[in-house]
Amino acid sequence: MRVILNGTPHDLDDGASLASTVAYLTTATTGIAAAVNGEVVRRSAWAQTPLRDGDLVEVITAVQGG
Amino acid sequence: MDDPFVIAGESMSSRLIMGTGGAPSLDVLDRALAASGTELTTVAMRRVDPAATGSVLDVLTRRGIRVLPNTAGCYTASEAVRTAQLAREALGTSWVKLEVIADERTLLPDPVELLDAAERLVADGFTVLPYTNDDPVLARRLEQAGCAAIMPLGSPIGSGLGIRNTHNIELIVASAGVPVVLDAGIGTASDAAIAMELGCDAVLLATSVTRAHDPELMAEAMRSAVIAGRLARLAGRVPKRRYATASSPPVD
């Protein structure tokens, strides 16, 4: 299946979880948050959140600004 | 003098809120933050960059500075609400500097979207600190919506033009029941002092320090300016007069 991860298409194994997808992008375990199709998913639920073909996944963190 | 700055029940001794944008490196930022004496500092929320090295969060954690995520880059209430929710999840804070801008050229707040976002975030349990126009009516509406502070601009973000409408800032201060933070437009130390003399409770600035020739030195200048302006406000300035008032006794 293919998801859009931070704006870029990625091919993932069917049934890949949000947790494994975030881990693929970054090794950071704090200071990050994720949303799937615009809905924030609590970190405690990442491992139990399977992704589906076409999902829009955003993984964000704090950067310098403001 | 014990003169704490209190927002939403949280007490701070520094009345200078710093932003982290614009610093040439994390090392320069680190030294500028230390020199500023700030206890509350903004960050922006952006997509994770797998190639990034070092994190602004590490700097803030090491310095023991409270993080204030912003919603910079959002043009609609919905975008701002989602960004605030992501920030709360990522950083474990329900405080948010709410920014909803109208266009890239001026970065001025969009008042309609701003008020909408403020109402939605307050309802969702956030402590909302809105970056707003220097409009006393909008400031009142934001306070009525439940915002924990009002943060009017002095002039556009990053412009360094200082406070263009001191009268409006005075009007906002005069009627606000929550802290007023002068946010955006500070160019140099005198601007920060004027904000405090006008009665603002704190100053929020970034560019004027981070893009100064010597950020660490300018941070120290801003720290002193905010203290000086606050003390002058509390001390009560003399009235302005058209003609001289002799400060020495008359000659016998």
Image: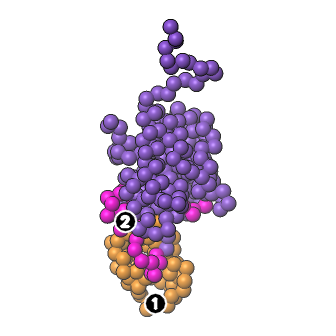
Chain colours: A orange, B purple
The dot on residue A12 is: 1
Identify the residue at image location x=62%, y=54%: B159
Given the current orientation, which residue lies at the most extreme front position?
B252
- Identify residue type, mark 1: Leu
Q: Nearer the viewer, residue A33 or B244?
A: B244
Residue that label 2 marks: B59
Identify the residue at image location x=55%, y=44%: B191
Can residue B222 be seen here? The reply is: yes
Q: Nearer the viewer, residue B144 or B181?
A: B181
Magenta span contains residue B71: yes
Given the image, what chain letter belongs to the residue carrying mark 2?
Answer: B
Relative image position of residue B207 (x, y in whole percent): 53, 58
Q: Estimate the spatial distance between the alpha carbons at disc 1 and disc 2, rounded to whole Å.
A: 34 Å
- Identify residue type, mark 2: Val
Circle 2 Cα neighbour tier, 10 Å, few/some/many (<14 / 14–19 / ≥20): some
Q: Above or below — where is B182 with respect to B124?
A: above
Q: Which residues are magenta?
A: B48-75
Relative image position of residue B123 (x, y in whole percent): 46, 51
Given the image, what chain letter belongs to the residue carrying mark 1?
Answer: A
